Image: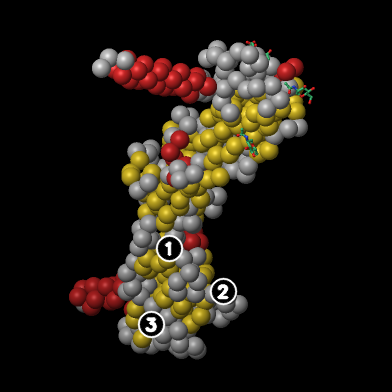
Amino acid sequence: MALTMTLELQALLLTCLVLLLHQKDPGAGAQKYPDFKLQQSQGPVVMATGETLTLNCTVSGLGPIGPVKWLKGSGSSSQTFYDLKGPFPPRVTRAVDESNTDFTIHIRDVRLEDAGTYYCVKFIKVIDGEEVFKSGEGTEVSVHARPSEPVMSGPSRRAVPGQSVPFTCSAAGFFPRDIQVKWLKNSVSVQAEPPNITPELSRSSYNMSSTIQVTLREDDIRSELTCEVQHITLADPLRRTYALRQALRVPPNVSVVAAPPGAVEVNKTVNFTCHVRGFYPGPATVTWLENGTETNAGSTTRPRETSRGLYELKSTVTVQAGEEKNGSRFTCRVVLKNLKPISSTGTLRIAAPAQWGPSDSCTGDNSAILLSSPGIWLGLLLEKVLLAIVLFFLFKRSRP
Ligand SMILES: *[C@@H]1O[C@H](CO)[C@@H](O)[C@H](O)[C@H]1NC(C)=O
Ligand SMILES: *[C@@H]1O[C@H](CO)[C@@H](O)[C@H](O)[C@H]1NC(C)=O
Ligand SMILES: *[C@@H]1O[C@H](CO)[C@@H](O)[C@H](O)[C@H]1NC(C)=O
């Protein structure tokens, strides 16, 4: 008797327990459908944006009435992603349409916001709706995004050699956060601080920017600065190159040379040539001033690129050496954008009619060459030597 009671009690308790479990934990209802199996055993998946994601889920055996749905996220953040009834999310398709056993789905053109954990869930219909009957283990999906093509920017204005200027390389929209930036100047590595990484507004990807300071040199006209971005999503680093000449402004060397170089006779013509050498960038304006007053005279050549990559040009004024112009100063003034004008002056010297000496010289201020005298000196010397030879022979002859 006592034994029957115990057995009956046990059976009752068990029934109660089953009922209780059925109500509290819907998953326990599985015991009613022992053959029912839901298979979602796909491990974590790493995708790149734009790829197609396949989420596998199959069911077998007899199950209760109720739909199979895909949920994204778990707990309170869980939301129905795809209920296989519609309206279907635009990028989602079923692998096997209308199938009652294969609930595998494809998500086309994966985006960063598709990252998350997806659960394949079998629901059971209850009086007031439906409850979870059995849930898959969930498939964790990470979406990796390639950084955008890097963008490089230099100083806002050109700088002269010797100045230190910033260069910035940036790339956007990558995931995960880890990224490496390398700087090279003419293929030689340049030391740089680690990049500054910030989350994007949506927080599903990151942006980075890396800045370095470079002291410009005159020969950087042919130099290149390269920023190399390496990320887990890239087989080869992304590169961006900046030609340093875009950041350079090289002031010219200006000098005035007179031709002929010495003092000239009255009414002869003299050419003052202004040599403007080694400047960058190309455009340069040359004006001539006669004794400080601007003149319209002078013809200027177009800038010519030298083998060093810098430019040079020359400008010439032709002057009629009227007596009243003795001592006139001819100034060549070179103007390059955003640089102070650079000048050089030549002075016209007119020889006094009867006077021929080394003091009467015409020079460019910067050239400081007294070319007029050597010819005359040489002439004088030669004359003396010839005279000496003639005298020597006469002397020899006079003494038999
Ligand atoms: C001055 O320049 C003109 C034209 O450029 C040239 O014909 C002339 O020979 C030059 N004169 C001298 C003295 O160099
Ligand atoms: C120079 O030229 C001016 C005017 O052309 C003339 O009056 C003067 O006699 C000339 N002088 C010489 C030394 O030839
Ligand atoms: C020109 O000036 C120099 C120096 O000022 C002087 O020696 C020379 O005699 C002058 N020439 C003439 C033609 O006046």
Q: Residue at x 45, y 84 (%)?
A: 95
Q: Earlier in the sequence, mark 2 or mark 1?
A: 2
Residue 65: image location, x then y, percent: 47, 84
Q: Residue at x 39, y 72 (%)?
A: 135
Q: Residue at x 51, y 80 (%)?
A: 93
Instruction: Look at mark 3 in the image and give the residue it sits on.
Output: 58
Camera-side mark, 2 or 1:
1
| 342 relative to 16 in the view: left or right | right
Q: Is residue 147 above or below residue 279?
A: below
The amino acid type of the residue labelled 1 equals Val
Residue 233: image location, x then y, percent: 38, 61
Residue 80: image location, x then y, percent: 52, 69
- Badge 1 density bin: few <14, some 14–19, many ≥20, Cα 10 Å: many
Q: Which mark is residue 84?
A: none
Residue 352: image location, x then y, percent: 65, 14
- Note whether residue 217 is visible: yes
Q: Disc 3 versus disc 1: distance between alpha carbons?
A: 24 Å
Instruction: Look at mark 1 in the image and give the residue it sits on.
Output: 143
Instruction: Look at mark 2 in the image and give the residue it sits on.
Output: 89
The amino acid type of the residue labelled 2 equals Pro
